[in-house]
Image (tube, rainbow, N blue to C red):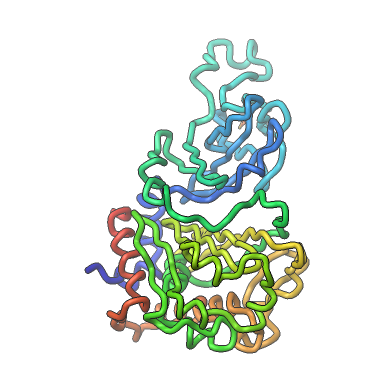
Amino acid sequence: MTSRPPKEAYTDAVWFRNETNTLFANAWIFVGTVHDFQQTGDYRTATCGNALLSIVRDEDGNLNALHNVCRHRGAELLEGSTGNCGKTIVCPYHRWTYAHDGSLRGVPNKVECFPDLDRSGYGLHPASVGVFRDLVFVNPEADADFESWIAPLQGKHWPHDLTAADVKEAIPLAYDLKCDWKVFVENALDGYHLAYLHENTLGGPLPGLNEWEPVGDHMIWHATEEGVRHRLPMKVREEAGNSGTIESASKTGYGGVYFLFPTTIIVPTPYGISISALHPTAAGRCRMTVRHWVGPRQSKDERKHIPGFDKSTGIISSDNWKTHPLETGDFQTEDVWICEKIQRGLESPAYTHGPLSNGVGAEDAIRWFHGTLDKHVT
Ligand code: FES
Ligand SMILES: [Fe+2]
């Protein structure tokens, strides 16, 4: 069975470029939810590999996936992660103007400057969009196959309903991570560490009391019934009250964590749901955005309680930690801490891969992840 790629895969710029040009040239990445696109002109942007992408809602309610790059001299068009562009997409450089479907509508001083230009040849390059259970994904390829990617998840129990009356979206989080995106994925898939690194936060379950189920390129994590009882500290379980505890959730059969290959991690909890999206930025570095929906008793802005949050930039970073991660009571901080330690270890000259566990529910999902990665990085 496939094990991990060589350590250069986590540290080397050439490997990173190869991953960018193969896997991320045709990958489905999370860009938002259908509820982000209420009005004509609402947009969200994303990068996938080097591709600058946007999803724009047109007046018929269609979501158009476009490369967010002007066809004149290449200026990036829509700015920020979200906004409304109005009736058209206008390039700030020379004001070439595009409709919401990307077709080129206006070229200033066309008669003087571009008398022979055929506008129909200069629409924005199309990308692809796919929607699954209100979640919107984008892919840089014009004719990417969403159905094949998502089909294995059809019919699976699913944990969230973002439109439920008692669910509200909190302010998103942005993490600057000094680790390769694959290190963070491996940690998310690691069932071996839950009882040890997270002894004082999640507190388990032990390997063998949880399992990952491969579902196409994706994976769904389940705690066994016994594992569920051990998974969360009593305080958290009490706080969940009647709003759908993880115990009752597990009886309905849905999983605990959903990993959508390659960079989306969906985590339902007794008190809400979070959707994390990893964005590789360089070999050994990535960013993670986390959107989360919380119950009525939770605050919409938890950022000031998150270790490492910097008000002036809005970024969460280990550079700003004031307390040791193991003393924060925040399991995400524990994960960031260990991932950055792993990355430093990978970059150390003495490092060679040690063995992955053969135990069920321990590190088997890491092998499956790399088996899938092997198919996509060529
Ligand atoms: S680069 Fe966009 S109009 Fe010139
Ligand atoms: Fe963890």
Which residue is found at the position 64% from the left and 64% from the top?
A: 272
Give coordinates of residue 202: x percent, y percent.
Answer: 56, 81
Q: Quadrant of residue 330?
A: bottom right
On screen, 290 above or below 35?
Answer: below
Count all numbered tags in the image, as a single digit. 0
Ligand 1 shown in quarter: top right
The image quadrant that residue 309 belongs to is bottom right
Nearer to the camera, 124 or 250: 250
Residue drawn at point x = 31 percent, y = 59 percent = 372
Inspect this view and state whether residue 340 appears. Answer: no
Residue furthest out toward the left:
1
| Residue 199 visible (yes or no) | yes
Residue 158 x, y percent position in the rendering: 50, 55
Looking at the picture, how far across and down is residue 267, in whole percent? 54, 64
Left/right placement of residue 101 relative to residue 186 reads right
Q: Quadrant of the N terminus?
A: bottom left
- Name the residue located 53 percent from the left edge and 29 percent from the top edge: 124
Q: Is residue 224 left or right of residue 159?
A: left
Depth check, front residue: 258 or 307: 258
Say if 214 sits above or below 120 in the image: below
Residue 145 location (% of width, % of height): 38, 39
